[in-house]
Image (spheres, grey):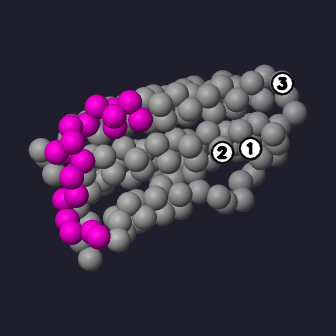
Amino acid sequence: MSYDFNIDEIFEMAEQIERNGALFYRKSAESVTDPDEKKLLTELAEMEDEHEKTFAALRADIAEEDKAATAFDPEDETVLYLRALADVRIFFKKTIDTSSMKEILKEAIIAEKDSIVFYLGMKDMVPENTGKAKLNAIIKEEMGHIKLLSGKLLAIAK
């Protein structure tokens, strides 16, 4: 079965990925005892919350005609498929090593990279006239996360 997603569905999934990311960082913050590490993870969760709001705002600005289904989908299976991908692929529930901040940051970087790869793949599935260019905003946000996380990881490794 071929899926053809509109930009509204992509932004809905982006919001879910950001919610999952915030949950990941909050749970990781609960597992560390160092106050500075806890603060960093809490701040990262708050950044994910802000990105979710950003994507929701982008989604709210989409023209009604761009929200139209791009394929016949009377059961809304496309949206269910996207939600499942967002829940399973990016920041999915897995056992992570939270014994050190270094391991938490490594896992976070992997998840952020996965989200970028996911969005790049989804970009190819979104028709040009339904907001393909808007996906660049999502990709840029996630690249910013990797830069921040990598900097923190390098600081810990010193």
Q: Which residue is mark 1?
A: 27
Q: Residue 32: x, y in percent?
A: 83, 37
For the residue pair 119 and 51, the one nearer the viewer reads as 51
Residue 143 at x, y percent in the picture: 42, 33
Determine if the magenta segment contains residue 117.
no
Quadrant of the frame with the N terminus: bottom left
Nearer the N terminus, badge 3 or badge 2? 2
**Residue 30 image position (x, y, % from top left):** 81, 39
Q: Residues within 10 Å of mark 2 (few under 14, many from 20)?
A: many
Q: CA distance from mark 3 to mark 1?
A: 15 Å
Q: Are marks 1 and 2 in contact (CB under 8 Å)?
A: yes
Which corner quadrant of the image does residue 137 belong to? top left
**Marks 2 and 3: in contact by CB < 8 Å?**
no
Type of amino acid at the residue the image marks with label 3: Pro
Give the residue number, with chain letter if any, for mark 3.
35
> How much space separates mark 1 and mark 2, taking CA atoms?
5 Å
Tell me if 100 is positioned left or right of 79 in this view: right
Label 3 crowding class (10 Å Cα cut-off): few <14, some 14-19, many 20+? few
What segment is highlighted magenta in the picture? Answer: 56-74
Left or right: where does residue 126 sit relative to residue 110? left
Marks 3 and 1 in Cβ contact (< 8 Å): no
* Residue that carries the numbered disc 2 in the rendered image: 24
Dot 1 crowding, Cα within 10 Å, few <14, some 14–19, many 20+? some
User: Under tag 1, what secondary structure?
Assistant: helix
Q: Position of residue 129 (x, y in %)?
A: 12, 44
Q: Position of 23 compared to 148: left or right?
A: right
Q: Is residue 121 above or below residue 81?
A: above
Residue 41 appears anywhere in the view: yes
Going by the numbered disc 2, the residue's amino acid type is Phe
